[in-house]
Amino acid sequence: MLRKLRWKFIFLIMALLAVVLGTALAVQTASAARQYREETDRVLRWVLQRGESLTDPGRPQPGGELDQDGELYTLIPAFYAVLDSRGRVVLAVSYNAEVDEEDVARAVAGALAAGTASGELEGQDLRFLMERRGLWLNMAFAGLDWEHAAVRRQALTALLVLGAALAGFFVVSLFLARWLVRPVEESWRRQRQFVADASHELKTPITVLLADTDILLSHPGDTIADQRRWVEHIRDEGLRMKELVGDLLFLARGDAAGPERPQGRADLSQLCEGCVMSFEPVAFEAGLTLDSAIAPGVSVTGNEEELRRLCAILLDNACKYGEPGGTVTVTLTAADRAVLTVHNTGEPIPAEVQPRLFERFYRADAARTREQGGYGLGLSIAAAIAERHRGKISLHSAQGEGTAFTVTLPLHKP
């Protein structure tokens, strides 16, 4: 599907380019052809005026270049003929054109047969212009071979330019299509991975539920008290499934919400203090010291419940992965933006896995996370909440410095 999308994009670019560039070159070629025609017509007028001066010595000489014999010189082959009242050619003059009496007679006959004062003789590749003055009919003829050749050269040049441009842009389009489709490919890959991971995570509790149910059904005479162990297993797995489905729905709603942002005022200081208090027993059981330095009166624009969940996720993550005897520190400051940092001491997160920590269902230590009941969605949800609140979440983890997750959020503006 993505390959078809890439080729469709390339075809669209090439089609648009061909239409735009082809139209421009066609207009340019047509303009050049019109200029060539005007040049031929100009020579015809010159030749006609020059010829008329031969029959009327008092007529002023037209402009133009003269050769050594005093004849008009033009690069365009042309000749001139004068007919008397009986239609006989009484004078014929050639200007840079190799014609004989037969050629002149055939051209004159064709022009007379056309019945117009100007036009083209297609079979002879000539254009003519005639004018009657008294008893004389003056005719000027110009060859069209040069004009046709010039138009063909112009058209060939335009086609070569169009072909070279299309070939060049085809190569560029290949790289451009890959660059533009790459985010789609990455999104598609992550979506497929997300579906596969979600299915895998749901499969485990469903399997446990079915197994426990089969055990209960195999002892139809027992009371609930007799099979309390399996009933509690079913309840625990059901609660785990409910938590997982809730997390998936939250992420799905965030993806579908688009640019919609929470607009209410939230007291971030109060939320963080509440989270710290609720996690003190958790830290104590994990053998950790929980410290906090929370600036008072820090308010942001957002949803209180979501921000509370963001703080809880970071604290839960710090307590899970902090080493016994270590310290978890929660810091909240405010300058231009609110900055929430949750830091724990201990071994750092390997550098090669840090870029993937915010991916859905990703676990840096899968075995340890499963033992503690995690699904690898916590940091993904935290990142989604931060983004939804026009904020940003970042990670810093290094040997001897521990691990710190930092969330920056815009302050509330009344």
Image (cartoon, grey):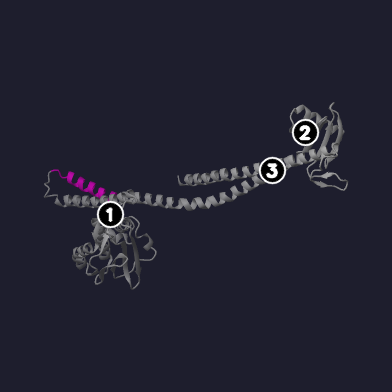
Residue 169 is at least partly visible in this image = yes
**Quadrant where the image shows the C terminus:** bottom left
Percent of width and height locating residue 118: 74, 33
Q: Magenta part of the protein: which range? A: 202-220
**Mark 3, residues whose alpha carbon is within 10 Å: few (<14), some, or many (≥20)?**
few
Percent of width and height locating residue 125: 76, 35
Depicted 7 relative to depicted 303: above or below = above
Query: Sequence order check: which comes first, mark 2 or mark 3?
Result: 3
Query: Sequence order check: which comes first, mark 1 or mark 3?
Result: 3
Q: Which amino acid type corresponds to the residue marked 2 in the rendered image?
A: Met
State the image quarter where residue 154 is shown. Answer: top right
Which residue is identified by label 2? 130
Q: Residue at x 57, y 44 (%)?
A: 18
Could you say whether the residue bearing mark 3 is in a helix, strand or loop? helix
- Taking the magenta stretch, the answer to whether it contains residue 203 is yes
**Quadrant where the image shows the N terminus:** top left
| Viewer-closest of 180 and 61 | 61
**Mark 2, residues whose alpha carbon is within 10 Å: few (<14), some, or many (≥20)?**
many
Depicted 218 relative to depicted 90: above or below = below
Percent of width and height locating residue 109: 80, 28
Which residue is identified by label 1? 263
Horizontal placement of 23 versus 402: left or right? right
Q: Which labelled disc corresponds to residue 35?
A: 3
- Taking the magenta stretch, the answer to whether it contains residue 88 is no
Q: Residue at x 60, y 49 (%)?
A: 165
Q: Which amino acid type corresponds to the residue marked 1 in the rendered image?
A: Gln
